[in-house]
Amino acid sequence: MALKKHVKDIMIPLEKYAVVSPDAALKEAVACLRTSYCEMETGICAETGPRTVLVVDESGALRGLLDFRTILKVLVPEVAGKFSQKIAALGATIAFAEAGAANLDASREGLRARVVKNAGIKVRDAMLKSVDNIQTDTRLMDALKIIFRKRIVVLPVYDGDRLVGIVRDTDLFLAVADMLRE
């Protein structure tokens, strides 16, 4: 039965996963994640790879991770903030917005400039720092329970105190789906 297997049987080894340094600019993390996520077919992203990038320091220690939502919150902060934060990110004031000013489109033109500016932020300042993890000998059923209880999509995998890979909700889904083929 698939769920009696261990995490080591389905994990993605660290060397095959997207990894960046905490000192890298967010722009580098975006490029790394895009490359690992997109399997290019005829110039179109086939959306097949990881949806997260691990943040690992020079000693190989996991410091955090970045996912699409976290990256987008930093690059385009107006999507996640309160009304006043959204307006400020657009370069306007609340009074300006409440007045229904027609020039709001002009402030939106600065989106690209804001994204480029925010892409210079260091990964360590944007990453999710609290990351649950599991050991290579963890049973898949236990990994599945953790993912559901914690409402997360990835679990870093350790062999003792050494980071060796990652298991994703998609890997666990495929293990369960394989039960239908047995």
Image (spheres, grey):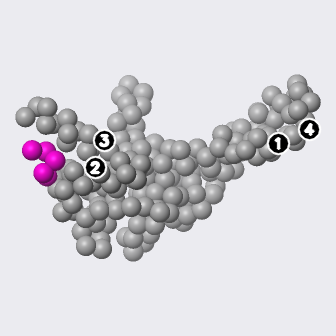
Identified at 60% across, 62% down, the residue is: 125
User: Distance between the Cα atoms at labels 3 and 4?
Assistant: 46 Å
Where the N terminus falls, by quadrant? top left
Q: Position of residue 72 (x, y in %)?
A: 58, 44
Circle 4 residue: 95
What segment is highlighted magenta in the picture? 1-5
Identified at 43% across, 61% down, the residue is: 131
User: Distance between the Cα atoms at labels 1 and 3?
Assistant: 40 Å
Q: Amino acid at mark 3?
A: Thr
Circle 1 residue: 91
Q: Amino acid at mark 1?
A: Gly
Choose mark 2 or mark 1, whichever is in front.
2
Mark 2, Cα crowd under 10 Å, few <14 / some 14-19 / many 20+, is: many
Identified at 73% across, 44% down, the residue is: 82
Choose mark 1 or mark 4, whichever is in front.
4
Circle 2 residue: 144
Q: Secondary structure at mark 4?
A: helix
Identified at 52% across, 53% down, the residue is: 28
On residue 67, the disc is: none
Instruction: Depth check: give the residue in front, 54 or 161.
Output: 161
Q: Secondary structure at mark 2?
A: helix
Choose mark 2 or mark 3, whichever is in front.
2
Circle 3 residue: 170
Relative to residue 87, is residue 120 depicted above or below? below
User: Distance between the Cα atoms at labels 2 and 1?
Assistant: 44 Å
Q: Secondary structure at mark 1?
A: loop
User: Distance between the Cα atoms at labels 1 and 4?
Assistant: 12 Å
